[in-house]
Amino acid sequence: MNDLLPAVIANLKAHKTWQEVSDWISVVGPKTRDFAGTVIFCPSTPFLAVAFGKVKSEQWKLQIGAQDVSRFGEGAYTGEAAASQIADICQYVLIGHSERRKYFREDDDILWQKVKNAAASHIEPIFCVQDENTKIPQEVKIAAYEPTFAIGTQEADSPANAKKVAREIKKKGDLTVLYGGSVSGDNVSQFLSEGLIDGVLVGATNSLDPQKFVRILESI
Ligand code: PGA
């Protein structure tokens, strides 16, 4: 991952139709060509394959990530997408997002199974933690510090505190650490200065509008 930093992730959550996803890629994709790091685009599961098809023959620094993966393997699990099914189109998957923990009651057991399945299928888990005390499975190489008070609120954590938490998280192992929660074109460079935070996870607040997302890339 290190030669791909800074990593900037767009988590579209359950937003946008396929046409809107396609338009988003058409705006953002060309802007990633000269970006120093990597952009990881996470649309809803039904759009992963078409998004991959749209970016794969381009010289863009835009990779595809999933927002979730099944805790089960392939089998009789209606509605699920197994890691082995999305492995050809996704290099990354978000696991442990606070919305999954809260609305889908995903606990450590479930999250550990998801991480294991992703890793076994060679998909890099991006493991979201709510603070420096959140447990991190040992297979994880990328952690995203996402304090719940900052998600979708336009009230980002202070860069100083986020760096302090990133430093604590890095003590747990050889981890790339991202920050997420109301990241914008105005504050992104403050999070990335000093090199403690290796990238940002941008959710609905500033990723849905492709122009706002491009502004984040341009501010780095
Ligand atoms: P936000 O969301 O950028 O809208 O605050 C971050 C996230 O949920 O990952």
Image (cartoon, rainbow, N blue to C red):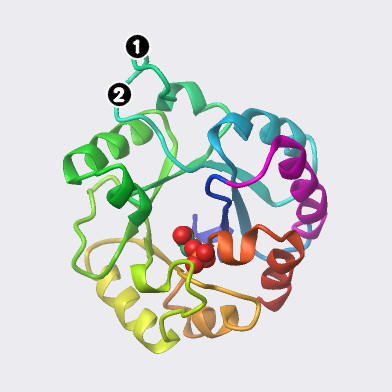
Quarter of the image with the C terminus is bottom right
Mark 2 lies on residue: 72
Number of residues whose C-alpha sits closer than 10 Å to that of mark 1, classed few (under 14), some (14–19) or many (20 or more) = few
Left or right? Give the position of 25 relative to 149.
right
- The residue segment tinted magenta is 15-32
- Tell me the amino acid under the disc marked 2: Phe
Q: Mark 2 Cα within 10 Å, few/some/many (few <14, many 20+)?
A: some
Residue 16 x %, y %: 66, 44
The picture quadrant where one finds residue 69 is top left
- Residue for point 63% across, 83% down: 186
Judge: label 2 CB < 8 Å from ligand 1. no
Name the residue type under label 1.
Gly
Give the distance between the C-alpha atoms of the residues marked 2 and 1, in whole angstroms: 8 Å
Q: Secondary structure at mark 1?
A: loop
Pointers 2 and 1 in contact (C-beta within 8 Å): yes
Q: Is residue 209 left or right of residue 191?
A: right
Q: Secondary structure at mark 2?
A: loop
